[in-house]
Amino acid sequence: HASPLPLGGETSLFLVRPLLGLPKARLVATLTAQRIGYSDDPSNRDPRFTRARLRGLMPELAREGLDARGLARFAARVRRAEATLEFAARAARAALAPGPWPLRGPITFATAPFANLPAEVALRLLGQAVAHTGDEGPVELGKLEDLYDALRLARSRLRRTLAGAQITLDRERLTVERAPARRNRTAAATVADTVKGRPKGLKHGRKGRFTK
């Protein structure tokens, strides 16, 4: 079992867990028989931690058919789906904004092709661009989803910031770049997001396009 763990931008750590599919009892028995020392983390049994409380539920889940083997099978299916989505996101990036991306941006996507992407693929591509150009740490998924929804529903020019990146949408293009320093953002935000009397923003049309 191996999977990349994103650390922000294009940096990732590749995590390899070759024994994940083996039952713990078998691992312990094998190590004991071979007189190989191993570490036993007491926090794994400490109910203050969520993972320990979830382990306490395993006997009940197993009685309902969701045992360790079933969970491992489900995890394998999720990994398969994840790999497919990552492949689709890389293909979308190559088609809409082939690299190399400038460190501070701008990264530009044509509005209509971006709007036609499947939601999960568009969300991942947007998140990659924000993480690449921003300078305020990892992108929170919930905030990224809110941003994507705002872009999808917008009907006029829209400008937002997220994780140190500035995202601007108009009829022709979606641009992601490093946001101005915070002390300079207030005036720009006031112009871009007037509370009263601003147009109703960008709408996602029937064909999946951002339309005026």
Image (cartoon, rainbow, N blue to C red):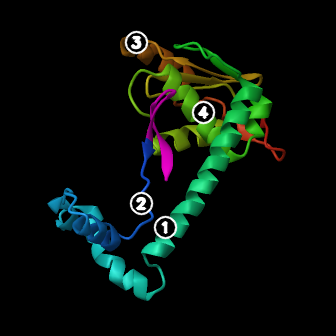
Mark 2: which amino acid? Answer: Leu
Between the residue at mark 2 and the residue at mark 4, the CA separation in whole angstroms equals 32 Å
Q: Taking the image as drawn, is residue 161 in sight?
A: no
Which is nearer the eye, 90 or 154?
90
User: To which quarter of the image does residue 44 belong?
Assistant: bottom left
Question: How many angstroms separate mark 4 from mark 1 (CA)?
Answer: 31 Å
Residue type highlighted by circle 1: Ala
Ranked by sequence position, the earlier of labels 1 and 3 is: 1
**Percent position (x, y) of residue 12?**
46, 33
Q: Which mark is residue 72?
A: 1
Distance from Cα at disc 1 to Cα at disc 3: 46 Å
Residue 203: percent from left, percent from top? 72, 40
Query: x and y percent of residue 65 in the render?
Result: 48, 84
Instruction: Kindly report which numbered mark, 1 or 2, lies closer to the viewer in this rendering.
Output: 2
Span of residues in magenta: 1-14
Q: Residue furthest right?
A: 207
Residue hosting label 4 = 126
Real-space Cα separation, disc 3 to disc 4, in angstroms: 21 Å
Q: Residues within 10 Å of mark 3 (few under 14, many from 20)?
A: few
